[in-house]
Image: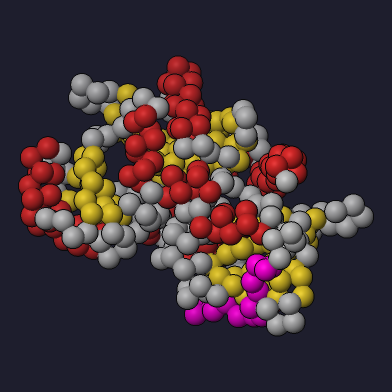
Amino acid sequence: MTGRRTRVLLLFGGRSAEHDVSRLTAVSVARALDPERYEVVLVGITTDGRWLLADDAATMLESARDALPQGFEVAGIPIVPSADPTRAELVVADGRAPLDVDVVFPVLHGPYGEDGTVQGLLELAGLPYVGGGVLASALGMDKIAMKAAFAAAGLPQAAYRVFRDGGDRAAFCDEVEAELGFACFVKPANMGSSIGVHRAVDRAQLEAGLADALEYDEWVVVEGAVAGREIEIAVLGDAPARASIAGEIIPGREFYDYADKYLDDSAEYVIPANLSGAELATVQDLAVRAFVACRGEALARVDFFYETEGAARGFLVNELNTMPGFTPISMYPKLWAASGKPYRELVDELIHLALARHARREKRAGRQR
């Protein structure tokens, strides 16, 4: 990399329902990369899974404001991983020319991007990449496996029940009604950005929410509603990881849904959250413990409920997101900016962490050959 800018492959789009969210994140990250230090190579994944060297996307990202043009479709030359396992590269399918990059920054959200699948492909290709590894990404995507990891680490969390498609829906709804009660939240196990999430206050809404959630995933988790505040912590680094100051989300709707997050900016963000010094220390410690429990690397946003009523008062870990949004209204960069690390410095550190991890792994891999 000496004598030239670091070449960053910005990987965006993807096959999941969060395709549009990923494109919005790509706008922000591309703008945060210092053009004097980085050269950006744009690769878009279409909704049908094709990887394209997205020449058209360069113009799109330069001209976009806070959103992408309506109807924009990724277009360009197909690329594929090298068939030679000794070469750490992606190649252009037409002519098999190597795509010379130093690090991959996958700004992919949801299945087929944030769940360990792309991370595994990049591992096989021998390419450094930003974010959690295969295991952390898989745990962070699957809410059921994540909750099991939290439980194994002794972390407090809300009561929940699990359902798999093909099971007895009526019996499951009976169980939820008897053991969790209403209100409750129905969520696809493998999805983010509140897609497919429903708040149910009666049996009819529970059944409808379950049916819709199963459109997104074979597994569904239903959580008991918590009367409390929504607190978020951003985690950064690797051995040791460190926690940001806390932020609080006050939803503009019945709960913090997709529209609140990305479309109408109706939610209120309180940064820093109104917590005492002791409360902040507690939630920061829980955030790092949740990060470690899921084998987190580089970055994650950890979401909490702060239960203010009932016998179980205190912080409850809700979930961990290994590739949180980087849109202008996203909490992760906002929390670090308020903690003294501006957006551009944040992106720099994430790239540094990716290269450092790759160097460590390559050193160990060399000893195994």
Image side of residue 347 versus residue 246, left or right: right
Query: In the picture provided, is 89 more to the left or to the right than 47?
Result: right
- The x and y percentages for residue 346 are 66, 43
Position in image of residue 240 (x %, y %): 62, 28
> At which x and y percent is residue 348?
72, 46
Query: Quarter-wise, where is residue 43 in the image?
Result: bottom right
**At x 50% / y 48%, what residue is drawn?**
137
Q: Position of residue 105 (x, y in %)?
A: 64, 56
Tell me if residue 313 can be seen. Answer: yes
Q: Nearer the viewer, residue 178 or 137?
A: 137
Q: Residue at x 44, y 45 (%)?
A: 140
Q: Is residue 345 visible?
A: no
- What segment is highlighted magenta in the picture? 70-83
* Picture quadrant of residue 213: bottom left
Write the residue at 20% across / 24% down: 310
Tell me if 156 is positioned left or right of 361 in this view: left
Q: Main secondary structure of the magenta part?
A: loop
Name the residue at 59% across, 37% down: 236
Q: Is residue 87 above or below residue 334?
A: below
Tell whether 64 sits left or right of 270: right
**In the depicted structure, whether residue 95 falls above or below residue 332:** below
Q: Which sits in the foreground, 360 or 47?
A: 360
Q: In the displayed orientation, state which residue is furthest to the bottom.
A: 94
In the picture as drawn, the residue positioned furthest to the top comes out as: 278
Residue 242 highlighted magenta (yes or no) = no
Query: How many numbered marks are there?
Result: 0
Residue 121 or residue 233, whichever sits in front: 121
